[in-house]
Image (spheres, rainbow, N blue to C red):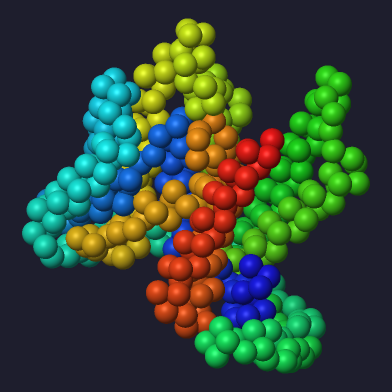
Amino acid sequence: MVFFQFYTGGILFKPVNLTNLVLQNSFIVIMALGMLLVIVAGHIDLSVGSIVAFIGALAAILTVTLGMNFWVAGVICLIVGGIIGAAQGYFIAYHRIPSFIVTLAGMLVFRGLTLTVLGGKNIGPFPKEFQLVSTGFIPDFLSFLGPWSFSGPWMQVNSFLFDFTTMSWAPVDVSIVTATWTINNVAALVLGILGAAALIFAAARRRASKISHGVDVEPANFFIAQNAILAFVIIFLAFQLATYKGLPNVLVVMLILIGLYSFVTRRTTIGRRVYAMGGNSKATKLSGINTERLSFYTFVNMGVLAGLAGMIVALRLNSATPKAGVGFELDVIAACFIGGASASGGVGKITGAVIGAFIMGVMNNGMSIVGLGIDFQQMVKGLVLLAAVFFDVYNKNKG
């Protein structure tokens, strides 16, 4: 992010672009939460891109063609996503057909169903209230306190370190200018500050609990520095969003899901059993855990999240298209591996998957801003994915 901030002349961290980053990558993050559990369980799901397209088409048929209430249509779409995941999970868990084969078949089947349902054409636009799920913003409930405006010095980058288009080095031209910031959404900034404070408080409680139980913890200076950086990043991003339109609705949905899945994977029995199954399926089964049911649940969960992502994608485009979701499965799987998930299962964190998704998003966004072709972008993303998996395998072999 620091590299692209300089290389794009400061465009990356502009409020409008940060909002675009959230909107462009929210569905990847949401699907990465489910894909992480699938990978941790020792499986893979290649069908999520096609499920995204199919659920988007279903949402369009229900709300645009049939005129159904969008809340009812949304619930139906999530249920259908779960049924699709259950159908695939049934063959994988109870008939022991490799997940690669089942989900590859699903990718083809649901892409074909999408073309059939849409008849090869786009369907839209969606009701405006439904669109707010993907394109709306949280209202400023503290608007009576703002807007706030202030000025200060700001570093402006006028040239870049390295120009990939000409493959030559260029001198760095940096100037200090006077910039003016206006907080248009006070609630977004306040919520960012409160969120940072809550994360620090939770981290301090976890550290104190570990100390009380005699568990080794990181040095105090490292803990303080780590959380200070985290708080700064959160408040900075909230500040940037507050100077534009505030917090996107989809960002709030994404943060709720991240918190929920972090809790499930860390604090619940089913979450720990998924990790145990991915680490050693036979030992987990011999300990009395129903591994077939666990595998089944991970695919049901993946189907529901893919359904949610499908609606978000369709609503953002304001139409259901036959080509929606093409290649999404690769970005989602890459996000999990870049975020530290192990190709052999049993290892991976929710936060890692989220970071991996945004790494992919920042690369896509940064390379698009500087005008690099899609061919070069695909090569860079492929090499980053290969490097991440190589690093994982190397560390495992070394250990």
On screen, 210 above or below 1?
above
In-front residue for pair 294/224: 294
Occupied quadrant, residue 208: top right
Counting labels gives 0
Residue 80: image location, x then y, percent = 24, 37
Q: Position of residue 20 (x, y in %)?
A: 48, 68
Residue 57 location, x and y as percent? 20, 53
Instruction: Name the residue: 33% across, 35% down.
Output: 99
- Left or right side of 304 for 126: left
Q: Residue at x 51, y 62 (%)?
A: 383
Side (left or right) of 274 relative to 207: left
Q: Quadrant of residue 4?
A: bottom right
Q: Position of residue 201 (x, y in %)?
A: 77, 39
Q: Does 176 sit left or right of 14 as displayed?
A: right
Q: Residue at x 68, y 84 (%)?
A: 161
Image quarter of the C terminus: top right
- Residue in front for this viewpoint, 116 or 163: 163
Q: Is residue 395 visible?
A: yes
Asked whether residue 21 is in view, the answer is no
Q: Is residue 88 above or below residue 55?
A: above
Q: Quadrant of the N terminus?
A: bottom right
Identity of the residue furthest to the front in this view: 397
Residue at point 63%, 38% (across, down):
396
Residue 132 shown left or right of residue 218 in the figure:
left
